[in-house]
Image (spheres, grey):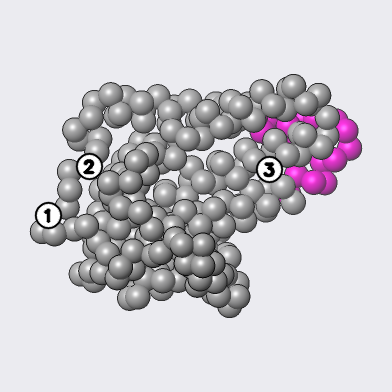
């Protein structure tokens, strides 16, 4: 087991939040089951407008854009939570703790069912999709706002799926279809993700597909962000 220098883990992993908070658990379940029909509705509304307005050609581009936006966002959040804040940070403390414990017990993610794998993201995605649809409706439902709605919805869909893809990367045994998807880099691939799990844990933060990892490493994106934050007085955690 490789221990991340900034992990809050002492001897035993902390109890999962869902084990101790029945209300939070119920909220996770409701969010997960609301997510899929809301995303389907949003995709249907926006894609129908684009199709009927002669912009069907934009659908694959918006799909690829949604995957890239999710990959980038997953990397940004992952980097931030690995290096800044603490388990006591308001609102995000639980997520920060989960990220850091993951470095010590990477295979623990494989023990979570669907609701606890994707539910923490669904909790944010449900109100966002509802407000996106509301804004699209108020903005006149034209092709441009429909393209924006579809892009934002797909980015959120892939953000929901990110922790599932991340879990798949850690599964010791995978079915053939999953191996196929990983091999062709449609989802996060195990060896690719293992680069992040190697000390000093400071690269390859993107965990949807990992497509952006080589580029972000080549342009030193995260070290430059850290330098910028240090310049404005935001320091990394000690040891991170
Ligand atoms: Zn990490
Ligand atoms: Zn991992």
The quarter of the picture where residue 121 lies is top left
**Looking at the picture, how far across and down is residue 115, in whole percent?**
35, 36
Magenta segment: does it hold 200? Answer: no
> Residue 73 bears which disc, if any?
none
The quarter of the picture where residue 130 lies is top right
Q: In the rendered image, which residue does mark 2 sit on?
A: 16
**Looking at the picture, how far across and down is residue 135, in whole percent?**
69, 26
Rounded to the nearest angstrom, the CA distance separating label 1 from label 3 is 41 Å
203 lies above or below 188: below
The quarter of the picture where residue 39 lies is top right
Left or right, residue 210 beside residue 142: left
If you read the primary sequence from the N terminus, does the residue marked by circle 1 or circle 3 appear first?
A: 1
If you read the primary sequence from the N terminus, does the residue marked by circle 3 or circle 2 appear first?
A: 2
Q: Nearer the viewer, residue 190 or 156?
A: 156
Q: In the rendered image, which residue does mark 3 sit on?
A: 151
Left or right, residue 97 beside residue 179: left
> Residue 12 bears which disc, if any?
1
Q: Which residues are magenta?
A: 42-60
Taken as a whole, is the magenta stretch helix, strand or loop? helix
**Residue 172 in view:** no
Rounded to the nearest angstrom, the CA distance separating label 1 from label 2 is 12 Å
Mark 3 neighbour density, 10 Å: few (under 14) some (14–19) many (20 or more): many
Label 2 secondary element: loop
164 lies above or below 115: below
Question: Residue drawn at (62%, 38%), measured in percent from left and top?
Answer: 153
Label 3 secondary element: helix
CB under 8 Å between discs 3 and 2 = no
**Residue 6 in view:** yes
Label 1 secondary element: loop
Q: Nearer the viewer, residue 188 or 224?
A: 224
């Amino acid at each position: 087991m490789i221990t991340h220098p900034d992990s809050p883990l002492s001897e035993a992993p902390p109890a999962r939040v869902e084990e101790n908070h029945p209300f939070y658990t119920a909220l996770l379940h409701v969010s997960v089951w609301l997510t899929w029909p809301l995303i389907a509705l949003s995709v249907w509304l926006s894609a129908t407008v684009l199709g009927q307005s002669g912009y069907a050609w934009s659908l694959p581009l918006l799909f690829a854009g949604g995957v890239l936006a999710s990959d980038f966002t997953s990397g940004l959040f992952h980097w931030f939570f690995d290096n800044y804040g603490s388990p006591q940070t308001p609102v995000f403390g639980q997520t920060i703790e989960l990220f850091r414990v993951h470095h010590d017990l990477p295979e623990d993610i494989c023990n979570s069912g669907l609701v606890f794998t994707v539910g923490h993201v669904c909790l944010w995605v449900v109100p966002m999709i509802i407000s996106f649809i509301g804004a699209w409706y108020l903005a006149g439902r034209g092709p441009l706002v429909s393209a924006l709605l579809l892009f934002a919805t797909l980015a959120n869909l892939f953000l929901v799926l990110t922790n599932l893809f991340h879990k798949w990367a850690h599964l010791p045994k995978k079915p053939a279809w999953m191996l196929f998807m990983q091999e062709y880099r449609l989802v996060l691939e195990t060896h690719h993700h293992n680069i992040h799990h190697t000390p000093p844990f400071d690269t390859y933060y993107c965990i949807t597909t990992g497509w952006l990892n080589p580029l972000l490493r080549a342009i030193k994106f995260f070290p430059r962000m850290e330098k910028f934050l240090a310049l404005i007085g935001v320091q990394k955690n000690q040891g991170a």
